[in-house]
Structure formats: C-alpha cells, structure tokens
C-alpha cells in the first residue's frame, strides 16, 4: 500500500477534462397545501442554490485534490452558461477552453426539495451532437492546449449530451496515443464501445448490463470478471473499474479482478458520486498509482460524497484521513 502522503502526488497534476458540463440547480422550500389544478404540492421557494455538474463537477473534484483541471466543452449563449462561468470563476477553474454556440442550450438540471425530500426535477438541455464546425473549433482548441501544456491525463466525461461525438472521441484518443498520455472514461450508453484503447474504463453496473445485454449480470466476482473480459475484447482497455453502488467497486487490470467493498454509510444523495470516482481514479492513473490503491481511494471518495445532499466535491483532508484509518500499514 502507499504511504501516508498518498494524496500529495496529486498536487500540481494537470488533467484535461473533456465532456458534457451542466448546472445543478436546487430550489428549497416548504409546502402546506396541494394545488387545486393538479394533485401536486404547492412549493413556496425559500432558497436557491447552483452547483457545477457533469464534467464541471469532475473538474471541481480534481481541483479539490490540489491538481489543475483544464475543462473543455461546448455550451450555449444563454443564462445557464453565464451561471456556469460565474461558478467556475468562484472556484478558480479557467473557462478559456469552453466554447459557446448559438446552436446549443446549456444543460441545467433543476431539483425542487420540500424540506429534505426531492419532489420534482426538470431539465433544460440539448442532446444533439456537435456539428462539424463546432467539432473543428473544439478539436483546434484542445490540440492547442496539448501542444502548449504538459497534460498528465485526459478524462472523458460522457453524459450523452452531445459534446463527445464520435469524431471528438476518435481524434482525441489518437492524440493521446501519439503523445503517450493516459486516458480515462466515464461512459454512458450511446458511445459505450467507441473508446478503443482507453487506459481506464469506468462504467457502472447498470451501464455494463445494458451494453452487454446481460440483464441478469450480478455483482459477483465471477460475473464481473466475465463482463470485464468481454468489454476488454472490444475496447482493448488496460484497466476496468465498475462501480457497484452500495456494494463497492470492481477493479481489473487484465488478470484476476477484485471487488473492493464499501463501508456502511448514511447515504443522503448519490448524485455526483460517479464524477468523484472517475476524478480520483484519473489522478491515480496519472501518477502511476497501484490499481488497488486507486480503487480503495475512489471507493472511499464516492462513499463520502454520498453522505451529503446534492452534487459536491470531495474533501481532500477527509479522504486522506479515512484512507489512512482503513488502509495504512500496521506497525
């Protein structure tokens, strides 16, 4: 296992984060009556909050670890984009690699809470792929970054909102291979098997079931090992990490895989946990960390953010503290 300074190796690492950014908006209020128009509560909004979501939350998690995220995406020219840029500035995350387009709407997910219970959610978004001109400008921007800065890892955060088109995926994977930059992917459904040759592939169990067409796939070592081998046959990836919700994480580097169980927690909200897991895993990949250490750290980090309501970044001090309690070498 790693020593007590396990997280210090993340300091100063530069990670290019590419994918779908969004705003997570929260409306909090109370309700004392039902609407006369429909069988729904009338919510009196008392407080509003906005947080970075999607690839922007990944960048925030990387920033929280002492590393340097370069966030690349395409958003609209709208109120959602202005909110996104304000939040990025507040967290000292540069927006210079985020392009704006008249053809897109910035994704905003709005959740309404009465006390601590979510009663509704509505999304404002586009899901179509970038057009050729948008692809060209984004690739041009990314190549300029790769030519001018030392990038230790490239992270693809795919939410199926259209930024990660086939052309973007293929071109960037080719660039990473030419430049010998490790890559990590948090996939969704549409382009699941397009990330050929990626270093680390991190789907969740439901995504694996759907893409392998194995609805009866269970979170057992035998089933997960078989699924990992089937994905590797198509992807030729080096490391497979499958998140298993409350059952932990499966990790496999082409040999005998292993399940890292999660500890019992008071789960408040699972939103954003996957963002945290891929952030930690990518930093571990960039620093050549042992794969079991990567899985242990990512497992703890994902569990910790689930103890808080809403999309939140990991706390570096708490992560280090729990890791040392759980995995430090015995004298």
Image (spheres, rainbow, N blue to C red):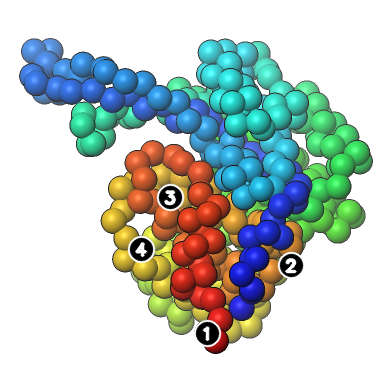
Sequence order check, earlier mark of 4 and 3: 4
**Disc 4/disc 2 C-alpha distance (Å):** 27 Å
Across and down, in percent, residue 225 comes to 52, 78
**The N terminus lies in quadrant:** bottom right
Left or right: 264 in relation to 139: left
What residue appears at the point 36 percent right and 45 percent down from the top-left corner? 308
Q: Which mark is residue 330?
A: 1
Q: Which mark is residue 315?
A: none
Which residue is most to the bottom? 331
Sequence order check, earlier mark of 1 and 4: 4
Sequence order check, earlier mark of 4 and 2: 4
Query: Which residue matches tag 3?
Result: 305
Q: Say if mark 3 contacts mark 1, CB within 8 Å.
A: no
Residue 313 position (above or below residue 293) = above
Can residue 320 be seen?
yes
Q: Say if mark 4 contacts mark 3, CB within 8 Å.
A: no
Sequence order check, earlier mark of 2 and 1: 2
**Disc 3/disc 1 C-alpha distance (Å):** 27 Å
Residue 227 position (above or below residue 72) = below
Q: Secondary structure under badge 3?
A: helix
Q: Nearer the viewer, mark 2 or mark 1?
A: 1
What residue appears at the point 69 percent right and 69 percent down from the top-left corner? 289
Left or right: 80 in relation to 71: left
Across and down, in percent, residue 236 comes to 71, 67
**Disc 3/disc 2 C-alpha distance (Å):** 24 Å
Query: Which residue matches tag 4?
Result: 246
Can residue 194 be seen?
no
Q: Nearer the viewer, mark 4 or mark 3?
A: 3
């Amino acid at each position: 296992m790693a020593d007590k300074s396990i997280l210090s190796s993340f300091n100063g690492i530069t990670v290019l984060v590419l994918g779908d950014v969004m705003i997570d908006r929260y409306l909090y209020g109370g309700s004392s009556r039902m609407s006369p128009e429909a069988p729904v509560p009338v919510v009196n909004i008392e407080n509003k909050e906005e947080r970075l979501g999607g690839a922007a939350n990944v960048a925030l998690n990387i920033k929280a670890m002492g590393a340097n995220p370069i966030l690349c995406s395409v958003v609209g020219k709208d109120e959602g984009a202005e909110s996104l840029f304000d939040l990025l500035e507040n967290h000292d995350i540069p927006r210079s690699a985020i392009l704006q387009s008249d053809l897109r709407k910035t994704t905003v997910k709005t959740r309404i809470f009465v006390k601590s219970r979510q009663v509704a959610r509505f999304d404002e978004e586009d899901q179509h792929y970038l057009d050729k001109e948008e692809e060209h400008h984004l690739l041009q921007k990314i190549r300029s970054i790769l030519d001018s800065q030392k990038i230790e890892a490239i992270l693809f955060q795919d939410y199926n909102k259209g930024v990660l088109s086939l052309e973007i995926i293929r071109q960037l994977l080719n660039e990473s291979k030419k430049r010998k930059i490790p890559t990590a992917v948090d996939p969704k459904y549409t382009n699941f098997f397009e990330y050929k040759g990626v270093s680390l592939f991190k789907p969740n169990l439901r995504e694996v079931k759907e893409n392998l067409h194995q609805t009866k796939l269970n979170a057992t070592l035998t089933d997960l090992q078989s699924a990992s081998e089937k994905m590797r046959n198509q992807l030729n990836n080096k490391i497979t990490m499958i998140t298993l919700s409350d059952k932990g994480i499966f990790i496999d580097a082409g040999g005998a895989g292993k399940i890292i169980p999660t500890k019992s927690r008071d789960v408040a909200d699972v939103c954003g946990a996957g963002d945290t897991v891929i952030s930690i895993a990518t930093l571990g990949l960039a620093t050549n960390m042992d794969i079991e250490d990567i899985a242990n750290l990512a497992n703890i980090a994902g569990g910790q953010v689930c103890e808080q309501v809403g999309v939140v970044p990991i706390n570096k001090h708490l992560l280090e503290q729990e890791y040392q309690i759980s995995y430090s070498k015995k004298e």
